[in-house]
Amino acid sequence: MDIESFYEQNEARRESAEFEFGGEWTDAVDNEYELSWVEATGELYLMVEPDAVVTEDAFGDFFTHGELVTDLTVVIIGKSPSLAALEDTLSGWEDAMLEPNSLVWLHQRFPTAP
């Protein structure tokens, strides 16, 4: 589903705090993914972004150009009851994310993910 549909399906997602666990996860063909956790729902999701031009403004904020909301695909890969429990499950993620095809590492921790 696209990112807007993800938030529309459950407004608690939109209002919730989110915690990011890196944006350099890769699959077997080097697509990059961002991993985030939604506090209100306990959902851990991956978002794949198409190649986009990224620029930085004078305040250090980053913006993407040429990227449509419908191009931001979201897949829920698991649930965690708390941030502490998720941090335990994802211990070592910073190094694992940088390995080739790092989604395999995630799948080992969330085997029921699609």
Image (cartoon, helix red, strand yellow):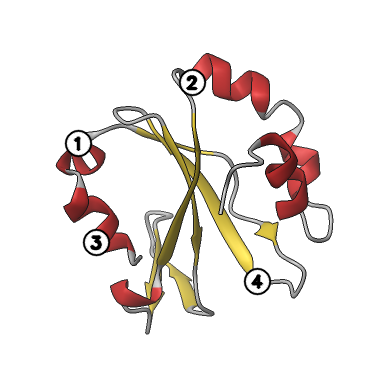
Which mark identifies residue 5? 3
The percent position of residue 21, horizontal first and vertical second, equals 57, 40
Label 3: which secondary element? helix
Q: What's the CA distance linking mark 3 and mark 1?
A: 13 Å
Sequence-wise, the earlier of marks 4 and 1 is 1
Q: Amino acid at mark 1?
A: Ala
Residue at horizontal 58 percent and vertical 60 percent from the top: 33
Taking 25 as reference, is 36 left or right?
left
Which mark identifies residue 83? 2
Q: Nearer the viewer, residue 4 or 66?
A: 4
Q: Nearer the viewer, residue 59 or 103?
A: 103
Q: Nearer the viewer, residue 60 or 8?
A: 8
The percent position of residue 42, horizontal first and vertical second, equals 39, 29
Which mark identifies residue 31? 4
Residue at horizontal 21 percent and vertical 44 percent from the top: 14
Crowd class of label 1 (few under 14; some 14 to 19; many from 20; radius 10 Å) = some
Residue receiving disc 1: 12
Label 2: which secondary element? helix
Q: What's the CA distance linking mark 2 and mark 4?
A: 26 Å
Residue at horizontal 71 percent and vertical 64 percent from the top: 27
Q: What's the CA distance linking mark 4 and mark 1?
A: 29 Å
